[in-house]
């Protein structure tokens, strides 16, 4: 077995026992990148030299007997909307093609202090707007399980890199499902943490009230390890919660017996494919065998959630992306005669279609005379959705749904149909709207070999419960760590 | 037709906090361009604002000073518009729930106390500055130093009926901001700026006329000129049968005219919405109360009190109150109850001000105390020493920690007011200056001055000149 094939948890233990070195692990992962990147196209920037330098430092520290974090020497890929000092952070947009941040995101500072090995910056939908990673200005990423299919989005590079063994772990960001959908499509584990538990400082904002950074990995324990390293209060993020967090990986134990799992009927409706439904229900049966109690519940506002999501997220995006005006950094149009034209041309040329569509939508819903009809109503709906979840968690420990109505679609299949593309997020957006944590884990494959994912949703700050529930299932099915063969 | 002017003001004041409103950058004026900024105030991708609590405290203090209701729980909003000096392309401000609202301020205008309504006070961030090239560089450049400097915007009700009302209100706001250490109010640095809304209506009418907003009013005297100009312009339009259109005009103080900036149709849609990067502002009732208690008597109310209680003129009252130290001294001298308040005011405005101006020193750097000053003034009032002598004593008291009376005695400055003693002096002088006495009686009244001088000389300058003069007159007319 090659080094890159191990999970972070396994590698961490091997590194501690000096059964391997960080340089060996890093070289193995980089070798894998060289071998399959041509087909997968997960990366925008590979920081090979930096990765090897960091790995050497870890080995030296370990040799010197310094106490090291579990993540020390673990190669991690970073979504390209998370600012990395001195390393290009493009948001997969022409607008930021050459943008090199002069500062690190808080999560990067935290990982740095854990001595992680930065493999590079991974592809995504432009400014995280999309569900297939096809709106990237630079390249289309393939699903490692089937190269003609999308990896999901917007953190498609994160999902694909972890799935293909091009990284041991990855950070993604999730505004409406952008960690969970790629996790589901690529067959890995992805956690969208409770809003406010991970600092957003240095995450290039899409929708500030919904965005969260989170981990992707090939095991529940891996995800717990990375989440523990990045969560916590940050004085630079005024929306980050003031609270203490347990070590989620240290406290990780299979725990499903007696747990009440709610199945909201609205998430198993007509739009969900038979394959997905049957695979998810098989998993539910397995959980029942493990001692969980299953209960059908209803979350009636779910039907309106997608509308509310696109109104709120686009409204915030239209404001967040206004700063890209060609004046200070990023792309600037070549020929312009005045300020107005500088703005127009820069933004017309620098942004892709999907980003422009959302900016226009967001600008419209915030406009005088339309605010009350759209934004205000969406915010009311947001309250209602949150309240329905709160009530549901009075009688359930976790809520279980498919992560997406279907498995990964073909590259190019939906790109011309925005509404169809938006519908892939139908099971995930409610979680962001309510600010809840949710985990996507694999639950089998369809007949073509594409992974199916299920989503576990918890009450605010119940990540440990989600992880423990998922671990019980993971152990029952013999683990999730399967790197597809890529030819 | 006779018209009435209706004016409302929106005043922006930069707060004198150490750091900016949403980042840790230094809040300073006049430093090298783009040295007082960081990724946060430059709106770099991924950065987030965190609110400087001192800004909220200062704004609440101003709210208390203007008798506002304090919204302990409020939010911040984004005001979206594109301009190169606004790096995020939105300004973080407050829209529908300002920190303070429904207030008023009492101001003395030309001797009359008036009450002006304050609609709201909200907090927001300042923008940067555009530097337009000329000889030194092409095009325009942006200085981000001012980005994120904290501002409060104070919006008044349309309660001013003249430019004098408006000016008095602006002066009152400035004195309050200075007194409460909220803003340094340096007009030349743009610490206070105002937008002026002007309309006119037939005198006696209750309905408001169409208002015109004027930007770029940078001084208080400029506000007076801008209001008078705009009111006259509107009246002329109406007199010629025209109508006023709602618009924004730009005041050009150098030329003394304004010109159209944009019409109502071109008004921007700022697409306000709640700032998602900042949580709701929640200030405890204890904090609100504590800030209220920290406020001492405010300058606008002091003016009113000095005029009504002590009989000072408004100008004298304002001059004393302009300086916190002078005002404090005045109050202490008056509180000593040794002397008349008006005399005390004259001393503060005269010798004390002269000393402070000439030396640049504060009275606290000297040996003088308010009680000693009060005592000294009381000796003048009771005729124990002359004004000229008091000045000599004053000089000593500034330098040395001594009792006024000791100094007076030591220097022999005590005035002779004893009538018997002075009558003798007068008799001697009259006897020795027959020619002058004759001159006076022949109508040369200026001989009196000479005779008084001789009396002073005879008393070595210590005779009470007023008394001597009275006695001389009595003696000259009696014979």
Image (cartoon, coloured by chain):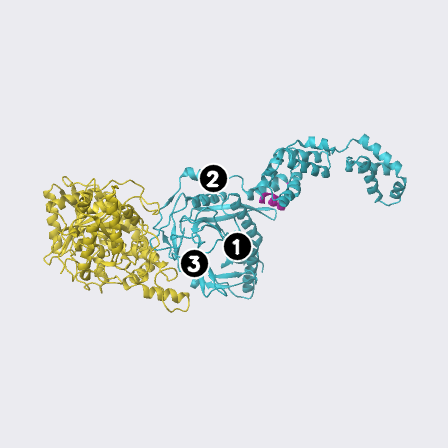
Give the colour of chain B: cyan
Choose top left, top right, bottom left or bottom right for residue B204. bottom right
Where residue A3 sits: x, y (%)?
Answer: 16, 51
Question: Which is in the foreground here, disc 1 or disc 3?
Answer: 3
Q: Which chain is yellow?
A: A
Residue matched to label 2: B292
Query: Tag 3, which secondary structure?
Result: loop
Looking at the image, residue B284 lies above or below residue A82: above
Query: Tag 2, which secondary structure?
Result: helix
Q: Chain of mark 2?
A: B
State which tag comes first along the sequence, 2 or 1.
1
Residue B7's disc number: 1
Q: Chain of mark 3?
A: B
Out of A310 and A473, give the one closest to the viewer.
Answer: A473
Q: Residues within 10 Å of mark 1 (few under 14, many from 20)?
A: many
Out of B56 and A17, give the one closest to the viewer.
Answer: A17
Query: Tag 1, which secondary structure?
Result: strand
State which tag comes first along the sequence, 3 or 2.
3
Residue B85's disc number: 3
């Amino acid at each position: 077995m090659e080094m890159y094939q191990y999970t972070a948890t396994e590698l961490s233990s091997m590194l501690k026992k000096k059964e391997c070195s960080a340089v060996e692990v890093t070289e193995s992962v980089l070798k894998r990148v060289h071998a399959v990147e041509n087909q997968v196209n997960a990366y925008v920037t590979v920081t090979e030299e930096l990765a090897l330098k960091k790995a050497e430092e870890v080995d030296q520290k370990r040799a010197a007997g310094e106490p090291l974090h579990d993540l020390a020497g673990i190669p991690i890929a970073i979504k390209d909307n998370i600012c990395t000092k001195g390393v290009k952070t493009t948001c997969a947009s022409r607008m930021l093609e050459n943008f090199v941040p002069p500062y690190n995101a808080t999560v990067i500072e935290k990982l740095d202090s854990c001595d992680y090995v930065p493999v590079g910056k991974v592809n995504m939908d432009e400014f995280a707007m999309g569900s297939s990673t096809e709106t990237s200005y630079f390249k289309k990423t393939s699903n490692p399980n089937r190269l003609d299919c999308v990896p999901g989005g917007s953190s498609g590079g994160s999902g694909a890199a972890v799935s293909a063994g091009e990284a041991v772990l990855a950070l993604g960001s999730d505004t409406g499902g952008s960690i969970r959908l790629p996790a589901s499509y690529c067959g890995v584990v992805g956690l969208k943490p409770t809003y406010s538990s991970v600092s957003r400082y240095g995450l290039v904002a899409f929708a500030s009230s919904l965005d969260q950074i989170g981990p992707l990995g090939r095991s529940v324990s891996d995800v717990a390890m990375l989440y523990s390293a990045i969560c916590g209060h940050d004085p630079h993020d005024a929306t980050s919660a003031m609270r203490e967090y347990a070590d989620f990986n240290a406290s990780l134990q299979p725990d499903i017996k007696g747990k009440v799992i709610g199945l909201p009927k609205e998430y198993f409706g007509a739009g969900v494919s038979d394959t997905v439904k049957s695979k998810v229900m098989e998993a539910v049966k397995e959980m029942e065998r493990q001692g969980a109690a299953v209960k059908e519940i209803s979350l009636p506002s779910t039907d309106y959630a997608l509308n509310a999501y696109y109104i709120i997220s686009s409204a915030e995006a239209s404001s967040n992306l206004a700063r890209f005006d060609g004046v200070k950094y990023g792309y600037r149009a070549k020929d312009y005669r005045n300020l107005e034209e500088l703005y127009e041309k820069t933004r017309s040329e620098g942004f892709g279609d999907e980003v422009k569509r959302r900016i226009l939508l967001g600008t419209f819903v915030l406009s005088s005379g339309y605010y009350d009809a759209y934004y205000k109503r969406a915010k009311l709906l947001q309250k209602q959705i949150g309240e329905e979840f709160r009530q549901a968690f009075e009688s359930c420990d976790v809520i279980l749904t498919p992560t997406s109505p279907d498995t990964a679609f073909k590259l190019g299949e939906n790109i011309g149909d925005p509404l169809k593309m938006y519908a892939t997020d139908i099971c995930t957006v409610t979680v962001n709207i309510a600010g809840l944590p949710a985990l996507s884990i694999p639950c089998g494959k369809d007949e073509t070999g594409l992974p199916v994912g299920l989503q576990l949703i918890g009450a605010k700050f119940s990540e440990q419960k989600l992880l423990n529930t998922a671990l019980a299932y993971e152990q029952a099915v013999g683990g999730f760590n399967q790197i597809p063969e890529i030819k | 037709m006779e018209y009435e002017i209706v004016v409302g003001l929106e005043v922006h004041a930069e707060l004198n906090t150490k750091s900016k409103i949403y980042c840790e950058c230094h809040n300073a004026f006049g430093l090298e361009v783009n040295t007082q900024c960081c990724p946060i105030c430059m709106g770099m991708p991924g950065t987030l604002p965190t609110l400087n609590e001192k800004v909220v405290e200062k704004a609440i203090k101003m709210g208390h000073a203007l008798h506002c209701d304090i919204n302990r729980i409020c939010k911040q909003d984004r005001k979206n518009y594109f301009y190169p000096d606004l790096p995020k392309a939105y300004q973080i401000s407050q829209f529908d729930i300002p920190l303070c609202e429904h207030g008023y301020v009492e101001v003395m205008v030309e001797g009359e106390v008036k009450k002006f309504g304050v609609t709201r006070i909200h907090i927001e961030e300042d923008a940067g500055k555009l530097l337009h090239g000329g000889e030194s560089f092409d095009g325009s450049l942006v200085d981000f130093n001012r980005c994120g400097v904290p501002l409060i915007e104070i919006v008044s009700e349309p309660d001013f009926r003249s430019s004098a009302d408006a000016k008095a209100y602006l002066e009152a706001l400035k004195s309050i901001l200075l007194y409460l250490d909220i803003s340094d109010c340096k007009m030349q640095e743009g610490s206070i700026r105002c937008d002026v809304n002007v309309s006119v209506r037939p005198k006696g009418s209750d309905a408001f006329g169409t208002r015109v907003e004027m930007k770029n009013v940078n001084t208080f005297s400029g506000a007076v000129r801008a209001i008078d100009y705009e009111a006259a312009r509107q009246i002329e339009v109406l007199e010629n049968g025209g109508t006023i259109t709602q618009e924004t005009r730009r005041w050009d103080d150098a030329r003394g005219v304004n010109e159209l900036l944009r019409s109502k149709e071109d008004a921007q849609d700022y697409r306000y919405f709640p700032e998602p990067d900042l949580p709701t502002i929640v200030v405890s009732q204890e904090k609100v109360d504590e800030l209220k208690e920290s406020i001492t008597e405010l300058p606008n109310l002091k003016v009113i009190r000095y005029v009504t209680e002590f009989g000072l003129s408004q100008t004298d009252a304002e001059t004393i109150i302009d300086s916190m130290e002078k005002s404090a001294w005045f109050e202490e001298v008056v509180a000593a109850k040794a002397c008349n308040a008006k005399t005390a005011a004259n001393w503060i405005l005269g010798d004390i001000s002269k000393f402070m101006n000439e030396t640049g020193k504060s009275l606290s750097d000297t040996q003088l105390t308010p009680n000693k000053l009060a005592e000294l003034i009381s000796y003048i009032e009771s005729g124990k020493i002359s004004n000229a002598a008091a000045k000599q004593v004053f000089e000593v008291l500034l330098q040395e920690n001594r009792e006024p009376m000791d100094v007076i005695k030591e220097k022999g400055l005590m005035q002779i007011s004893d009538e018997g003693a002075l009558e003798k002096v007068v008799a001697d002088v009259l006897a020795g200056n027959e020619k002058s006495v004759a001159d006076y009686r022949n109508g040369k009244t200026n001989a009196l001055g000479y005779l008084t001088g001789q009396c002073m000389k005879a008393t070595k300058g210590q005779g009470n000149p007023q008394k001597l003069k009275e006695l001389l007159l009595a003696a000259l007319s009696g014979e």
